[in-house]
């Protein structure tokens, strides 16, 4: 049995897409299990760049089954654009399967996301405004519209009518904005339904059958541990469960089926949106990392906040998801720095903290404890064997492994498939 879960260990954009694409070569099935088109996963194949928001990164290989699981929230317009964009590039999308239990993002979710953010003022979360939070809110309030409803015209119309009545009232009365016309939304969404129908399936059955017959399954997390609704830096989080446990709920498999968990770790730290970030660099080094690393959001284009590698965060992610191996990415971005700082823990009011703080007030005030390590100041992007990495680069990631308590499984020194070193086979 081989079911490998790949998750982000920091605040997202660690390079999950690249690692999943790399590992997908050996997989039969690739599954997205949470989030929506707030995710932006960039994959580079033979110098060609693909930006994925909803489709699993396995889509770039022929003859793989790619599942969009029940835990994902689907904006049908975005998904269809992505499918059609792939077809135009000659990518075969016939292996795509969309869960009939996934929830559908509606136009009022997107508008609510925008007006709620405005209403929050100084307390805004910095969401991607893609309607993710409001869609999960409806799911939890048991008012959402699922793919299975969208496929049934009668059910869809009844649910749309009820939802629009409530949402239009809310939009007008609380936020002072116009709502949506029933006929227009109905027409638009029934057209999406027709186009999506061939892909809709009971994906939990497909997946469990695949596992039972010995096929290899890869789960692709979106977002990351510190954006997890329960375990992240709440409320500056997303509304789903990017941790490894989320794969069980968001895809419909038992925890006993997961054979390995891989945590993707960017060799430094970034964050988009609001919320505390203990190792943030608001200086020339932060700017150097942002420019050298092109750290601007794939989804929103916002500049990403950059900082030193925080091993306290990675250690926490390792515990919460039971991570077996780290996949360290973007080591090459640090090639020019003379000295690197690694955060090994936090001090609060003079005391070393034993746990990752739940209180954001505490997290905002902690003092990171740093170890200084010498840089390597040589290019690593052409290195193909771990032993050939500069000694100081190996020392840096080996010290991270020691402090985080997680073994190194993969090291990546560039966006291409060939710029990947495997220290342990994952399948
Ligand atoms: P994701 O959301 O976790 O999939 O990450 P993103 O795609 O948002 O951001 C990661 C970016 O880094 C993408 O543009 C990748 O192509 C790129 N990338 C991944 N691994 C490496 C690496 O080792 N080195 C460099 N230079 N770029 C990488
Ligand atoms: P990938 O999969 C980085 C952040 C947003 C915001 C918070 C809540 O590419 O790593 P939301 O729209 O989800 O309600 O926004 O979460 N966020 C991400 N940050 N990478 C992502 O995805 C993200 N998806 C959401 O910036 O702070
Ligand atoms: Mg991303």
Image (spheres, helix red, strand yellow):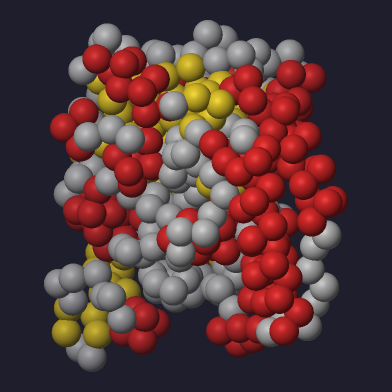
Q: Is residue 407 left or right of residue 144?
A: left
Q: Residue at x 47, y 51 (%)?
A: 223
Q: Residue at x 16, y 32 (%)?
A: 256
Q: Is residue 294 left or right of residue 381?
A: right
Q: Residue at x 17, y 49 (%)?
A: 405
**Residue 201: x and y, percent?**
50, 24
**Residue 135: x and y, percent?**
56, 58
In the image, is residue 204 above or below residue 235?
above
- Image label count: 0
Q: In which quadrant of the rendered view does residue 258 lie? A: top left
| Residue 222 visible, this orientation | no
In the image, is residue 37 above or below residue 367?
above
**Residue 84: x and y, percent?**
75, 26
Quadrant the N terminus occupies: top left
Q: Is residue 242 left or right of residue 222?
A: left
Q: Is residue 379 left or right of residue 215?
A: right
Quadrant the C terminus occupies: top left
> Which residue is at the far bottom?
349
**In this orientation, which residue lies closer to the viewer: 80 or 386?**
80
| Residue 405 visible, this orientation | yes
In the image, is residue 329 above or below residue 314?
above
**In this orientation, which residue lies closer to the viewer: 227 or 42?**
227
Q: In which quadrant of the rendered view does residue 354 lie? A: bottom left
**In this orientation, which residue lies closer to the viewer: 315 or 214?**
214
**Residue 248: x and y, percent?**
29, 39
Q: Residue at x 23, y 54 (%)?
A: 320
């Amino acid at each position: 049995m081989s079911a490998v879960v790949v998750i982000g260990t920091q605040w997202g954009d660690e390079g999950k897409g690249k690692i999943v694409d790399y590992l997908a070569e050996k997989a039969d099935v690739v599954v997205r299990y949470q989030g929506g088109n707030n995710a932006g996963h960039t994959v580079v194949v033979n110098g060609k760049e693909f930006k994925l928001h909803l489709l699993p990164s396995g889509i770039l290989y022929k003859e793989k089954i790619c599942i969009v699981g029940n835990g994902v929230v689907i904006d049908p317009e975005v998904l269809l654009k992505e499918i059609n964009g792939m077809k135009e590039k000659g990518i075969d999308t016939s292996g795509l399967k969309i869960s009939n239990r996934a929830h559908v993002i509606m136009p009022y979710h997107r508008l609510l996301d925008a007006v709620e953010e405005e209403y929050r003022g100084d307390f805004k979360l910095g969401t991607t405004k893609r309607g993710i939070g409001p869609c999960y809110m409806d799911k939890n309030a048991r008012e959402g519209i699922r793919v299975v409803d969208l496929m049934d015209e009668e059910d869809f119309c009844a649910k749309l009518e009820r939802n629009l009545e409530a949402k239009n009232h809310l939009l007008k009365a609380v936020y002072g904005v116009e709502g949506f016309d029933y006929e227009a939304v109905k027409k638009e969404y029934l057209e999406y339904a027709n186009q999506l129908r061939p892909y809709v399936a009971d994906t939990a059955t497909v997946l469990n059958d695949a596992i039972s017959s010995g096929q290899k399954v890869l789960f692709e997390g979106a977002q990351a541990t510190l954006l997890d609704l329960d375990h992240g830096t709440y409320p500056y989080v997303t509304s789903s469960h990017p941790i490894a446990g989320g794969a069980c709920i968001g895809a419909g498999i038992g925890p006993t089926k997961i054979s390995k968990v891989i945590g993707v770790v960017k060799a430094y730290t970034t964050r988009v949106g609001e919320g505390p970030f203990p190792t943030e660099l608001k200086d020339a080094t932060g700017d150097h990392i942002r420019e050298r690393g092109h750290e601007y959001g794939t989804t929103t284009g916002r500049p990403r906040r950059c900082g030193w590698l925080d091993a306290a965060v990675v250690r926490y992610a390792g515990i919460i998801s039971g991570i077996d191996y780290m996949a360290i990415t973007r080591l090459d971005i640090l090639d020019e720095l003379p000295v690197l700082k690694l955060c090994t823990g936090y001090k609060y009011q003079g005391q070393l903290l034993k746990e990752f703080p739940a209180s954001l007030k505490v997290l905002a005030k902690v003092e990171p404890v740093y170890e200084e390590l010498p840089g390597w100041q040589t290019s690593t992007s052409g290195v193909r064997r771990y032993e050939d990495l500069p000694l100081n680069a190996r020392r840096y990631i080996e010290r991270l492994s020691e402090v985080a308590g997680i073994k190194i499984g993969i090291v990546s020194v560039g966006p291409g498939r060939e710029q990947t070193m495997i220290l342990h086979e994952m399948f």
